[in-house]
Image (spheres, helix red, strand yellow):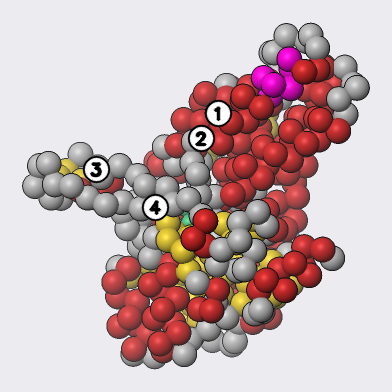
Amino acid sequence: MNKYSTPFKSIQWNESHITIIDQTFLPEREVYVDLRTSGQVWDAIKKLKVRGAPAIGIAGAYGFYLGIKDLPENTFNTFYSECERVADYLNSSRPTAVNLSWALNRILKTIYSKKKSDISDLKELALSTAKTIHDEDRRLCKSIGEHGMKLIPDNARILTHCNTGGLATAEFGTAFSIILHAHIAGKVKQVWVDETRPLLQGARLTAWELQKAEIPFKLNIDSAAASLMNQGLVDLVVLGADRIARNGDTANKIGTSGLAILANHFGIPFYVAAPYSTIDMNTKSGEEIEIEERDAEEVTSFGSKLMAPKKTEAYNPAFDVTKNDLITAIITEKGVLKPDYTESIKKALDS
Ligand code: MRU
């Protein structure tokens, strides 16, 4: 695994701007776009050009710097209240993945802790913190893969949902990193890739990443999961998270909780993989997690083609919450956490 590196860069810092792979063009084209302002970063997150919980945290962190770098250098209080405004603005782009507010709060706290410094130094501090968040995510993801692969049996047939790979993180991914590590260790027979309606992150993005990594997979429609499990074709489910409450309840891409219920019914292990930046100790349980609702057109149309009669109303929550009692283990960079999650999460974060 030491030699493996993800064969594309989800986000890069280039002196004065970030360059992201625009995920809305995948898998047809690998298009890289430059983002030079916090407004462009906000828009890219909102439109899912950059997506996946850790990746939007990283993009948000750089976006913060882009939003404050030209602020006038007067008093700390004026500067800091502008910083808070920029952070609030970026945080309004998507509500569910906590990694965004986590990254922004981390930078705000770092700036505040050095309030006696020159404003120009504080700006540089914001940038260096963004870079640290970026580098750290790469290491966390690698470590999640190393811990998680130990849970994967030989000849594993693994079902996954949405996209949790290098596109969704700095590198390697979360659940994807586990699959990748297990594959390199020769343990993966096949990955089942849920297409992940309505925006097809599984079909467009996970299939693209698996193909690049030469990991055997088959794409299935989301509603085939029960049938696959019933036929004994799935050994385990592993997927990511957008926010994990302190009791282990987990918000992830819509469809996740249904998979957890199915896995439980069929006695199949159901694993969630995420770095500590996805765990929200300020959220007691899943009921408190805000679920993003997206435009109805994502459900009623396919690109420019109508898939339902004009004026059809649709309900389009982007995420759902899986109750902690349906989760076999939560795999983090610290190791494999087991129930009772209130205790194991606290212990892991305190260590
Ligand atoms: O709406 P998206 O594509 O940003 O949703 C992403 C997911 O739900 C992922 O599973 C989650 O962010 C984990 S990514 C490592």
Q: Secondary structure at mark 1?
A: helix
Mark 4 or mark 1, earlier in chain: 1
Mark 3 or mark 1, earlier in chain: 1
Query: Residue 52, how many percent across, how many down?
Result: 53, 50
The residue located at (62%, 48%) in the rendering is: 99
**Comparing marks 3 and 1, which lies closer to the viewer?**
1
In the image, the residue with mark 2 has its CB under 8 Å from the nearest atom of ligand 1: no
Q: CA distance from mark 3 to mark 1?
A: 25 Å
Res. 60 image quadrant: top right
Q: Secondary structure at mark 3?
A: helix
**Callout 4 touching callout 2 (CB < 8 Å):** no
Residue 69 visible somewhere in the drawing: yes
From the image, tell me which residue sits under label 1.
89
Q: Amino acid at mark 3?
A: Glu
**Comparing marks 4 and 2, which lies closer to the viewer?**
2
- Magenta stretch bounds: 78-83
80 falls in the magenta region: yes
In the image, the residue with mark 4 has its CB under 8 Å from the nearest atom of ligand 1: yes
The residue located at (24%, 43%) in the rendering is: 297
Q: Which mark is residue 318?
A: 4
Query: Residue 108, how many percent across, how many down?
Result: 74, 33
